Amino acid sequence: MLQQLFTPSVQHTLDLIGIFVFAISGALLAVRKNFDVFGIAVLAEATALGGGLFRDLIIGAVPPAAFTDLGYFVTPLLAALLVCFLHPHVERIQAGVNVFDAAGLGLFCVAGTTKAYEYGLGLHASAALGLATAVGGGVLRDVLANEVPSLLRWDRDLYAVPAVVGSVMVAVCIRYDALNPLTSTLAAATAFVLRLLAMRFHWRAPRAWNRRSTVREEEPPRQPTAKATA
Amino acid sequence: MLQQLFTPSVQHTLDLIGIFVFAISGALLAVRKNFDVFGIAVLAEATALGGGLFRDLIIGAVPPAAFTDLGYFVTPLLAALLVCFLHPHVERIQAGVNVFDAAGLGLFCVAGTTKAYEYGLGLHASAALGLATAVGGGVLRDVLANEVPSLLRWDRDLYAVPAVVGSVMVAVCIRYDALNPLTSTLAAATAFVLRLLAMRFHWRAPRAWNRRSTVREEEPPRQPTAKATA
Amino acid sequence: MLQQLFTPSVQHTLDLIGIFVFAISGALLAVRKNFDVFGIAVLAEATALGGGLFRDLIIGAVPPAAFTDLGYFVTPLLAALLVCFLHPHVERIQAGVNVFDAAGLGLFCVAGTTKAYEYGLGLHASAALGLATAVGGGVLRDVLANEVPSLLRWDRDLYAVPAVVGSVMVAVCIRYDALNPLTSTLAAATAFVLRLLAMRFHWRAPRAWNRRSTVREEEPPRQPTAKATA
């Protein structure tokens, strides 16, 4: 068992911030997809809590924190309410939301990796679950909204790679017994900054070798939908 | 631990009725989507058992009842068989199916909330899981059929709100130590009647504030698919 | 508890082969959907490990083998790498891949049924989980790629039925205390051969009675997408 990285109240506040910004991204997609207020609340909850829920089911931490901590449950509802009434403004400050989302990514990959290791998983599995915690909510959001997960699309700026880097940094720190508030803040900050840079310079992952030459003719009809979610 | 609300055989019969009517709705969607008989059976199973499966994984009741009770497993197959041979008739009696589906909604939100509380979850989490039990199967059905979940769509009559009301009524009864066969029947009946009224008068939830003015131009191409599932 | 069917190293090798061929099918779909290299890796992992993950969550075997065995985690990455660089060749040898995929189907339905029974599930539930192990990864692959699961489509050759036959054979052998390396190899081989025959002779399951006459007019717009994944 690792010692507590931060005081519980600091850790809890960081979790709530991450949950809040992920919920905003879910609620905004729901507004774009024309869902009703209930659909907006559901998508906010799923986006905010989906990654942690998956991690908790895998490591056997049932009932998951999402269902035992009232704050985790109420925060996405507040985000949904905010988006319902202010969504033109929230969209206008999309850049700001993206910065918060990047912060959530950094916080969740560190918290996810640490919690998985505390429940006895190996280092590589802990890093994989840190990644899943950080990106799982977004995948669930897109599946529920019947979209191709933006995590998988080549025409999106790098999202997973910063989370991979953060998760692996935490795993390496655990391996060398060097996980402390300083190093884990460093890991979260690295993921955060990498994601900001990826958005700023539109870094993208390559596609399969020679991909361009083959099935381009099937894709154009899908682009309008893609643009709608961009 | 709550005392048994109904005699086990009454409770089991109610569960099987709920499973059967949900399975009918899954099988009908499968027929509309042109799936083969195996796909019809799978979608009937997923719709009928998905909500309870999710609840059981969350509360740690493994293996879930869906896999330990042969009746839970066989009932959806019977519903699928019925739909395969009689689907024009089942569609013609859609109104009747909707009434049964509303009954299933009422039964499942009460049973789900009660079971979650018995497994030690808090009141708000129990109510949330009651809702998830009632609507989860329908969401899984739509995700597997590659449709936008009708739970989330603004152009569907209220479905979740009746289940929320039923679940919250159960939670309030537990809180004041007043859960008994009478009050839980009342909660199920309230959800049932609210759903019937929502269908009769086409009650719908509002969308986000000012929603109409923004991205209407993206939606029309999707409407034909939407109509196909209506 | 059943005695070990094969020596652990033989069983492990068979598992890795099944994981590898399923990962190939996930990676190929990702290439066709134009995902980036990270999306290819994610879809390979999900396809290869999804069925076993679902089974392990249901039977309470947490953390699932997919997260405790490094080989299970790395094998799909190798398959993804191979597909990224060689995908025109892998597509050209699609027939060969299909044969391997059929072998994976046979191996997974036997391994899934056996493991579920070892964890105390009943015979019918074990057979159902054997089926889920064999086909679950493919369903997850298609849901993540935002496609109608090919498992459910009527215009695909039989896929689930061979797995049902293999799973039921194992369950019957357990029932009569006759499960041994010979009979379980026979069950896997039966599923394998049935799948090969289904592909060779384009066996398909029937659709619902009188299906053709009703909603054909809604389907044509979807066919181009369907063809793209064929």
Image (spheres, coloured by chain):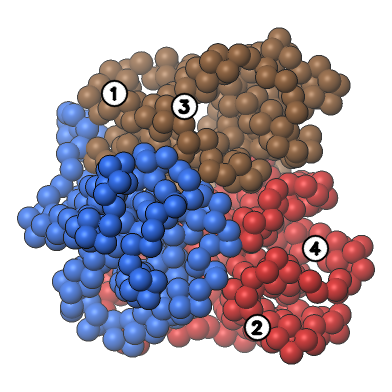
Chain colours: A brown, B blue, C red
Looking at the picture, how far across and down is residue A217, in whole percent? 50, 52
Q: Chain of mark 1?
A: A
Dot 4 and dot 1 within a common chain: no
User: Which residue is denoted by mark 1 in the rendering?
Assistant: A82
Residue at point 56% right, 51% down? B60
Amino acid bearing label 2 = Val
Dot 1 and dot 2 within a common chain: no
As helix, strand or loop, the secondary structure at mark 4 comes to: helix
Residue at point 80% right, 63% down? C15
User: Which residue is denoted by mark 2 in the rendering?
Assistant: C168
Amino acid bearing label 3 = Ile
Frontmost of labels 4 and 3 is: 3
As helix, strand or loop, the secondary structure at mark 2 comes to: helix
How far separated are the C-alphas under marks 4 and 3? Answer: 37 Å
How far separated are the C-alphas under marks 4 and 1? Answer: 49 Å
Residue pushed farthest left? Answer: B201
Query: Is C141 situated above or below B174?
Result: below
Q: Chain of mark 4?
A: C
Dot 3 and dot 1 within a common chain: yes
Mark 3 or 1, nearer chain start: 3
How far separated are the C-alphas under marks 1 and 2? Answer: 53 Å
Residue at point 34% right, 84% down? B82
User: Which residue is denoted by mark 4 in the rendering?
Assistant: C15
How far separated are the C-alphas under marks 2 and 4? Answer: 20 Å
Quarter of the rendering occupied by the N terminus of chain A: top right
Q: Chain of mark 2?
A: C
Between B136 and C75, the one nearer to me in the picture: B136
Amino acid bearing label 1 = Leu
Q: Which mark is residue C69?
A: none
Q: Which mark is residue A19?
A: 3
